[in-house]
Amino acid sequence: MALFGKSKDTPSQAISEPVDPGWYRNAKGKFPDLFTLDPEEAGLSAKGGVFLIWHGGIRPEWVYVGHAPDMATALLDIGRNKDVTYYENRGGLFVTWSFVLEEYRDGVVKFLQENLPTLVESANTYPEDTLPVPVFSPGREPGRVQAAKPKPKPAPEPAPEE
């Protein structure tokens, strides 16, 4: 079941395993700053998908999740939303997106809202019976999460001679 292909099917069965949505990162592998991003220049005009916004800082938090048929317009509108921009002073606001087929967007947003509580309620609504579509959150995609390597134990110090 593709989230990104050319299907126009209505999701009829639950997706049980998380899908890597291919969250956008810039050429340096970083997530863009919401206020320095030009969404039209980034090619988001008339392109639909799901987007996530969070603030950095000492204790980063998810700020907003949504979807739109034109992500450029949606992100420009979000950049003027005072409920969202309020959090900019907490380490900056960052954004990422994925081009998700229209029929899966509600499910992806529902999953993200249920698993990544946001500080600002999404303007998106969806039917009560919408099936959540599990996706990896930004920074947790397969191949990006590395297991912690055990630190080598220091050699024991010799006991002092008496």
Image (spheres, rainbow, N blue to C red):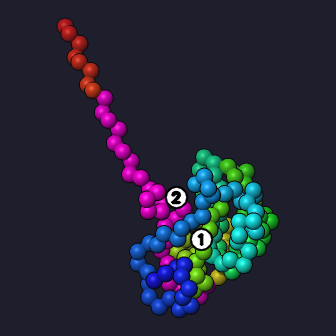
Q: Residue at left 54%, top 62%?
A: 138
Say which amino acid is labelled 2: Gly
Q: Residues within 10 Å of mark 2 (few under 14, many from 20)?
A: few
- 12, 100: nearer the viewer: 100
Q: Which residues are magenta?
A: 126-154
Q: Position of residue 155 (x, y in %)?
A: 27, 26
Q: Is residue 10 magenta?
A: no
Q: Label 2, label 1: how many angstroms apart (C-alpha)?
A: 13 Å
> Which of disc 1 and disc 2 is earlier in sequence?
1
Residue at the (61%, 84%) spot, across then down: 102
Q: Amino acid at mark 1?
A: Ser
- Give me the residue at 72% from left, 63% from top: 84
- Identify which residue, 36 or 131, lies in the foreground: 36
- Position of 38 compared to 63: left or right? right
Mark 1 lies on a secondary structure that is strand
Q: Give the image quarter of residue 22.
A: bottom right
Q: Nearer the viewer, mark 2 or mark 1?
A: 1
Report which residue position mark 1 lands on.
Answer: 98
x and y percentages locating residue 122 in the rendered image: 66, 73
Describe the element under mark 2 as helix, strand or loop: loop
- Mark 1 burial class by Cα count in 10 Å: few <14, some 14-19, many 20+: many
Query: Which residue is drawn at the image coordinates 31% and 29% (left, top)?
Result: 154
Establish if 10 lies above or below 140. Answer: below
Q: Does residue 6 appear left or right of residue 134 in this picture?
A: right
Residue 21, given in percent of the width and then of the height, sits at: 52, 71
Return the residue at label 2.
139
> In the image as oriented, which residue stretches furthest toward the right?
80
